[in-house]
Amino acid sequence: MSNRIISLLSFLVILITGCFFYIVINYDLNELFSGQNSDSNVVVVDQKQEERKDSSTDDDTMDDLEPSIVLDNLEDGDIIISPFVITGKALGPWYFEGSFNVFLEDSSGRELTRSIVSTSDDWMKEGYASFSTILNFAALSNPSATVVFEKANPSGLEQNAEQFRVPVFFESKSTNIRIFFSNTTRDPEMKECGKVYFATRSVSIGDSLIETAINELLKNTNKVERQYGFVSQIKNDVELNNFTVKGRIVSVDFSSHLYSSVSNDCEKRALIAQITQTITQFGDIDSVDIFINGEKFE
């Protein structure tokens, strides 16, 4: 009897051991001990894929943001002519009491002119309010500039400041410039030696309005200008050697005939005023240095 019991127990041990190894071979131990099998709903997260998804979501959100200002008739690189009317719309927070500022600056960042953007819409409502404004500006020697829209900031806090910038160009087939002369009608006895008066001329726009203006000055007065008393202290045979522009200072060099153009100090002061004011009429030029064949003329 005991031998039979031992044999039976041995058979059961062998059977149980065989079943265990069968389970180990055919099932994943992780699933076995976690109580899950291959049919369980397991969510696998790819971190890189999720990051890409998050990035894509951020980009989509940015694309959905409304621009602060939408312009009807002005884009980057447009050519504008004074007076220039600008129309468009801006989001309500850009306004304070129905307006905000716009200004024009040259390539060096100097402000040339300023105007007020105003709306008749309800700017306190959500969304856009339409506006219009006009920019008036003089001719510039440098054809590039920037129209800058400036968000109203009554608090004066830097974190509330915002700008919308549009680079533009000035160009047209012709423009009016001022050429400065003495005037015997306005000052018959030339008592105000350095006082000069301008005559307006229409000129074609080339590469440089400064050079155009200087060459117009060297042409002397025309018949109509002489009838109105304009007189030039610069003789007809004076020639322009060259000119340079550094920042807001122009250096201009003339031929030696400029010496013979004046016979006294009063005429010399008038001549210098003619050249200086003819060149500094442009909004981006502050001062002029005059030379004769490379030597400073003072």
Image (spheres, rainbow, N blue to C red):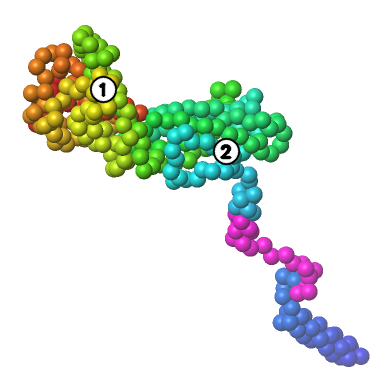
Given contact means CB atoms under 8 Å apart, are the residues at marks 1 and 2 in contact?
A: no
In magenta segment, residue 48:
yes
Q: Position of residue 258 (x, y in %)?
A: 11, 26
Which secondary structure, mark 1?
A: helix
Q: Secondary structure at mark 2?
A: strand
Q: Earlier in the sequence, mark 1 or mark 2?
A: 2
The residue labelled by disc 1 is 227
Residue in the picture at 40% in, 37% down: 145
One can see residue 280 in this view: no
Residue to which mark 2 is pinned: 87
> Would residue 182 be found to the left or right of residue 159 on screen?
left
Quadrant of residue 8 in the image? bottom right
Where, quadrant-wise, is the N terminus in this rendering?
bottom right
Q: Amino acid at mark 2?
A: Thr
**Residue at 61% from the left image edge and 48% from the top image edge:** 62
Q: Is residue 291 magenta?
A: no
Q: Is residue 124 visible?
A: yes
Marks counted in the figure total 2
Camera-side residue: 235 or 252? 235
Where's the C terminus, which quadrant? top left
Mark 1 → mark 2, Cα distance in angstroms: 44 Å
Residue 153 in which image quadrant? top right
Asked whether 286 or 170 is in front, the reply is: 170
Residue appearing at x 55%, y 32% in the figure: 133
- The extreme right residue here reads 1
Residue in view at x 67 percent, y 62 percent: 45
| Mark 2, other Cα within 10 Å: few <14 / some 14–19 / many ≥20 | some
Specify the amino acid type for callout 1: Gln
Magenta-highlighted residues: 34-56
Question: Which quadrant of the figure has residue 290?
Answer: top left
